[in-house]
Image: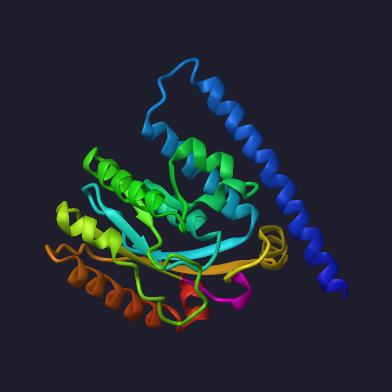
Protein backbone atom coordinates (compact mmCIF):
# COMPACT_ATOMS: atom_id res chain seq x y z
CA UNK A 1 0.00 0.00 0.00
CA UNK A 2 2.76 2.46 0.96
CA UNK A 3 4.75 1.57 -2.16
CA UNK A 4 1.68 2.21 -4.33
CA UNK A 5 1.10 5.58 -2.66
CA UNK A 6 4.74 6.61 -3.11
CA UNK A 7 4.57 5.52 -6.74
CA UNK A 8 1.51 7.69 -7.41
CA UNK A 9 3.23 10.67 -5.79
CA UNK A 10 6.31 10.04 -7.94
CA UNK A 11 4.27 9.87 -11.16
CA UNK A 12 2.31 13.00 -10.18
CA UNK A 13 5.50 14.96 -9.54
CA UNK A 14 6.89 13.80 -12.86
CA UNK A 15 3.73 14.97 -14.64
CA UNK A 16 3.98 18.41 -13.02
CA UNK A 17 7.66 18.74 -13.93
CA UNK A 18 6.91 17.80 -17.53
CA UNK A 19 4.20 20.44 -17.77
CA UNK A 20 6.61 23.07 -16.47
CA UNK A 21 9.38 22.00 -18.85
CA UNK A 22 7.03 22.07 -21.84
CA UNK A 23 5.93 25.60 -21.02
CA UNK A 24 9.54 26.69 -20.41
CA UNK A 25 10.85 25.15 -23.62
CA UNK A 26 8.06 26.63 -25.72
CA UNK A 27 8.54 30.08 -24.23
CA UNK A 28 12.32 30.05 -24.62
CA UNK A 29 11.97 28.78 -28.18
CA UNK A 30 9.52 31.50 -29.15
CA UNK A 31 11.83 34.13 -27.66
CA UNK A 32 14.79 32.68 -29.55
CA UNK A 33 12.90 33.14 -32.83
CA UNK A 34 13.25 36.88 -32.33
CA UNK A 35 16.98 36.46 -32.90
CA UNK A 36 17.23 33.56 -35.35
CA UNK A 37 15.28 32.01 -38.20
CA UNK A 38 13.20 28.92 -37.55
CA UNK A 39 14.39 25.82 -39.45
CA UNK A 40 13.78 22.09 -39.15
CA UNK A 41 17.26 21.83 -37.62
CA UNK A 42 16.27 24.21 -34.82
CA UNK A 43 12.96 22.38 -34.37
CA UNK A 44 14.73 19.03 -34.06
CA UNK A 45 17.29 20.54 -31.66
CA UNK A 46 14.43 21.73 -29.45
CA UNK A 47 12.73 18.35 -29.55
CA UNK A 48 15.93 16.45 -28.79
CA UNK A 49 16.66 18.69 -25.82
CA UNK A 50 13.16 18.27 -24.42
CA UNK A 51 12.84 14.51 -24.94
CA UNK A 52 16.26 14.00 -23.35
CA UNK A 53 15.12 15.98 -20.32
CA UNK A 54 11.73 14.26 -20.26
CA UNK A 55 13.36 10.83 -20.38
CA UNK A 56 15.49 11.71 -17.38
CA UNK A 57 12.52 13.10 -15.46
CA UNK A 58 10.53 9.91 -16.07
CA UNK A 59 13.44 7.65 -15.17
CA UNK A 60 13.84 6.10 -18.62
CA UNK A 61 17.10 4.17 -18.84
CA UNK A 62 18.05 3.02 -22.31
CA UNK A 63 20.76 1.22 -24.17
CA UNK A 64 20.97 1.93 -27.90
CA UNK A 65 22.82 0.20 -30.72
CA UNK A 66 23.27 1.63 -34.22
CA UNK A 67 22.90 5.15 -35.61
CA UNK A 68 21.04 7.22 -38.19
CA UNK A 69 21.56 6.55 -41.88
CA UNK A 70 23.45 9.37 -43.62
CA UNK A 71 20.72 9.89 -46.25
CA UNK A 72 17.04 10.84 -45.88
CA UNK A 73 15.25 7.60 -45.02
CA UNK A 74 12.07 5.97 -43.84
CA UNK A 75 12.52 4.63 -40.29
CA UNK A 76 10.07 1.91 -39.26
CA UNK A 77 9.70 0.78 -35.65
CA UNK A 78 7.67 -1.72 -33.70
CA UNK A 79 5.31 0.02 -31.27
CA UNK A 80 5.07 -0.69 -27.54
CA UNK A 81 3.94 2.49 -25.76
CA UNK A 82 3.23 6.20 -26.11
CA UNK A 83 6.74 6.74 -24.73
CA UNK A 84 8.41 5.08 -27.76
CA UNK A 85 9.07 8.42 -29.53
CA UNK A 86 10.69 9.81 -26.38
CA UNK A 87 13.45 7.25 -26.87
CA UNK A 88 13.62 7.19 -30.67
CA UNK A 89 13.75 10.93 -31.29
CA UNK A 90 16.73 11.41 -29.00
CA UNK A 91 18.76 9.55 -31.61
CA UNK A 92 16.83 10.19 -34.85
CA UNK A 93 15.85 13.52 -36.37
CA UNK A 94 12.62 12.62 -38.15
CA UNK A 95 9.06 13.65 -38.73
CA UNK A 96 6.88 11.19 -36.83
CA UNK A 97 3.70 9.81 -38.36
CA UNK A 98 1.22 9.53 -35.50
CA UNK A 99 -2.43 8.66 -35.13
CA UNK A 100 -4.71 11.69 -34.87
CA UNK A 101 -5.54 10.83 -31.24
CA UNK A 102 -2.02 11.92 -30.23
CA UNK A 103 -3.16 15.51 -30.71
CA UNK A 104 -5.19 15.03 -27.54
CA UNK A 105 -2.38 13.61 -25.38
CA UNK A 106 -1.16 15.98 -22.67
CA UNK A 107 2.63 16.61 -22.38
CA UNK A 108 3.23 15.38 -25.93
CA UNK A 109 0.86 17.11 -28.34
CA UNK A 110 2.22 20.67 -28.33
CA UNK A 111 5.84 19.66 -28.57
CA UNK A 112 4.98 17.24 -31.36
CA UNK A 113 3.18 19.91 -33.33
CA UNK A 114 6.06 22.38 -33.00
CA UNK A 115 8.83 19.97 -33.89
CA UNK A 116 7.54 17.64 -36.58
CA UNK A 117 4.58 15.27 -36.67
CA UNK A 118 2.30 14.07 -39.47
CA UNK A 119 -1.13 13.06 -38.17
CA UNK A 120 -3.23 10.33 -39.74
CA UNK A 121 -6.78 9.14 -39.00
CA UNK A 122 -6.46 5.37 -39.18
CA UNK A 123 -10.13 4.83 -40.01
CA UNK A 124 -10.09 7.40 -42.83
CA UNK A 125 -8.85 6.14 -46.21
CA UNK A 126 -8.26 9.65 -47.55
CA UNK A 127 -6.26 10.57 -44.45
CA UNK A 128 -4.09 7.47 -44.81
CA UNK A 129 -3.45 8.23 -48.49
CA UNK A 130 -2.59 11.84 -47.67
CA UNK A 131 -0.21 10.69 -44.93
CA UNK A 132 1.59 8.34 -47.34
CA UNK A 133 1.97 11.16 -49.84
CA UNK A 134 3.24 13.49 -47.12
CA UNK A 135 5.71 10.77 -46.11
CA UNK A 136 7.10 10.56 -49.65
CA UNK A 137 7.20 14.34 -50.12
CA UNK A 138 8.94 14.86 -46.78
CA UNK A 139 11.69 12.32 -47.47
CA UNK A 140 12.25 13.49 -51.05
CA UNK A 141 12.57 17.03 -49.64
CA UNK A 142 15.52 15.80 -47.56
CA UNK A 143 14.03 14.85 -44.17
CA UNK A 144 13.65 11.54 -42.34
CA UNK A 145 10.25 10.09 -41.43
CA UNK A 146 9.50 7.65 -38.59
CA UNK A 147 6.46 5.36 -38.79
CA UNK A 148 4.96 2.54 -36.73
CA UNK A 149 3.69 0.14 -39.43
CA UNK A 150 1.96 -2.24 -37.02
CA UNK A 151 -0.79 0.38 -36.95
CA UNK A 152 -1.31 -0.03 -33.20
CA UNK A 153 0.56 -0.74 -29.97
CA UNK A 154 1.51 -4.38 -29.39
CA UNK A 155 2.57 -6.49 -26.39
CA UNK A 156 3.37 -9.59 -28.47
CA UNK A 157 6.91 -10.97 -28.59
CA UNK A 158 6.92 -10.56 -32.37
CA UNK A 159 5.55 -7.64 -34.36
CA UNK A 160 2.00 -7.54 -35.58
CA UNK A 161 2.40 -8.03 -39.37
CA UNK A 162 3.44 -4.69 -40.80
CA UNK A 163 1.01 -2.87 -43.06
CA UNK A 164 2.05 -2.75 -46.70
CA UNK A 165 1.34 0.86 -47.67
CA UNK A 166 4.51 2.62 -46.54
CA UNK A 167 6.75 -0.12 -47.93
CA UNK A 168 5.10 0.09 -51.34
CA UNK A 169 5.68 3.85 -51.36
CA UNK A 170 9.31 3.36 -50.32
CA UNK A 171 9.88 0.80 -53.09
CA UNK A 172 8.14 2.94 -55.71
CA UNK A 173 10.18 6.04 -54.83
CA UNK A 174 13.56 4.37 -54.17
CA UNK A 175 13.50 5.38 -50.50
CA UNK A 176 15.89 3.61 -48.10
CA UNK A 177 14.17 1.89 -45.16
CA UNK A 178 15.86 1.61 -41.77
CA UNK A 179 14.19 -0.69 -39.20
CA UNK A 180 14.14 0.00 -35.47
CA UNK A 181 13.59 -2.67 -32.81
CA UNK A 182 12.36 -1.36 -29.47
CA UNK A 183 11.78 -3.40 -26.31
CA UNK A 184 10.85 -2.70 -22.68
CA UNK A 185 11.84 -4.79 -19.70
CA UNK A 186 8.60 -4.51 -17.72
CA UNK A 187 5.19 -5.47 -19.07
CA UNK A 188 3.56 -2.46 -17.37
CA UNK A 189 5.60 -0.21 -19.68
CA UNK A 190 3.60 -1.51 -22.64
CA UNK A 191 0.29 0.15 -23.46
CA UNK A 192 -2.07 -1.69 -25.81
CA UNK A 193 -5.13 0.41 -24.97
CA UNK A 194 -6.92 2.50 -22.36
CA UNK A 195 -6.58 5.93 -20.78
CA UNK A 196 -3.39 7.91 -21.42
CA UNK A 197 -3.43 9.32 -17.88
CA UNK A 198 -3.91 5.90 -16.27
CA UNK A 199 -1.05 4.48 -18.34
CA UNK A 200 1.21 7.39 -17.41
CA UNK A 201 0.67 6.73 -13.70
CA UNK A 202 0.94 2.99 -14.24
CA UNK A 203 4.22 3.22 -16.14
CA UNK A 204 5.98 6.09 -14.43
CA UNK A 205 5.14 5.37 -10.80
CA UNK A 206 8.17 3.04 -10.93
CA UNK A 207 11.60 4.51 -10.18
CA UNK A 208 12.90 3.50 -13.61
CA UNK A 209 11.75 2.28 -17.00
CA UNK A 210 14.28 0.15 -18.89
CA UNK A 211 14.26 0.07 -22.68
CA UNK A 212 16.55 -1.24 -25.42
CA UNK A 213 16.64 0.06 -28.98
CA UNK A 214 18.52 -1.07 -32.06
CA UNK A 215 18.74 1.02 -35.22
CA UNK A 216 19.19 -1.53 -37.97
CA UNK A 217 20.83 -1.71 -41.37
CA UNK A 218 19.48 -0.06 -44.52
CA UNK A 219 17.07 -2.06 -46.68
CA UNK A 220 16.26 -1.19 -50.28
CA UNK A 221 14.16 -3.15 -52.74
CA UNK A 222 12.06 -2.37 -55.80
CA UNK A 223 9.31 -4.72 -54.57
CA UNK A 224 7.27 -3.40 -51.65
CA UNK A 225 6.16 -6.80 -50.37
CA UNK A 226 9.70 -8.15 -50.35
CA UNK A 227 10.91 -5.00 -48.62
CA UNK A 228 8.25 -5.37 -45.93
CA UNK A 229 9.16 -9.02 -45.35
CA UNK A 230 12.87 -8.23 -45.07
CA UNK A 231 12.30 -5.44 -42.54
CA UNK A 232 9.75 -7.41 -40.53
CA UNK A 233 12.01 -10.48 -40.35
CA UNK A 234 14.97 -8.40 -39.21
CA UNK A 235 12.85 -6.73 -36.53
CA UNK A 236 11.52 -10.03 -35.17
CA UNK A 237 15.02 -11.48 -34.98
CA UNK A 238 16.33 -8.39 -33.23
CA UNK A 239 13.43 -8.32 -30.77
CA UNK A 240 14.22 -11.91 -29.81
CA UNK A 241 17.79 -10.84 -29.08
CA UNK A 242 16.74 -7.74 -27.11
CA UNK A 243 14.39 -9.76 -24.92
CA UNK A 244 17.40 -11.49 -23.36
CA UNK A 245 20.08 -10.33 -20.92
CA UNK A 246 18.49 -7.26 -19.36
CA UNK A 247 20.71 -6.93 -16.29
CA UNK A 248 23.89 -7.52 -18.28
CA UNK A 249 22.93 -4.85 -20.83
CA UNK A 250 22.37 -2.14 -18.24
CA UNK A 251 25.27 -3.15 -16.01
CA UNK A 252 27.53 -2.45 -19.02
CA UNK A 253 25.73 0.71 -20.13
Type of colouring: rainbow
| Front residue of this view, candidates 155 and 251 | 155
Answer above or below: position of 248 versus 148. Answer: below
Magenta region, residue range: 183-189
Examine the rendering and report whether any part of residue 52 can be seen.
Answer: no
Examine the rendering and report whether any part of residue 84 can be seen.
Answer: yes
Q: Is residue 187 magenta?
A: yes
At a point 81% along the width and 59% down the height, the residue shown is: 9
Answer above or below: position of 150 versus 83. Answer: below
Say how many tags the image has.
0
At a point 80% along the width and 63% down the height, the residue shown is: 8
Q: Is residue 188 magenta?
A: yes
| Front residue of this view, candidates 39 and 165 | 165
Say whether residue 24 is left or right of residue 160.
Answer: right
Question: Looking at this rendering, what residue extends furthest in the right direction?
Answer: 2
Say whether residue 178 is left or right of residue 148.
Answer: left
Amino acid sequence: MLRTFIGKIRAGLRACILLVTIASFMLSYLISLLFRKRTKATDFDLRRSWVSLASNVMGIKYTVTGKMHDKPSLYVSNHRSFSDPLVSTIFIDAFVIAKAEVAGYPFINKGAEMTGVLYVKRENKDSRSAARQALVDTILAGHNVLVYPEGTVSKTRKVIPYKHGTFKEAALNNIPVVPIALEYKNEVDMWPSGSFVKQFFRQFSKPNTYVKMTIGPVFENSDGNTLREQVENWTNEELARLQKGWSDAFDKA
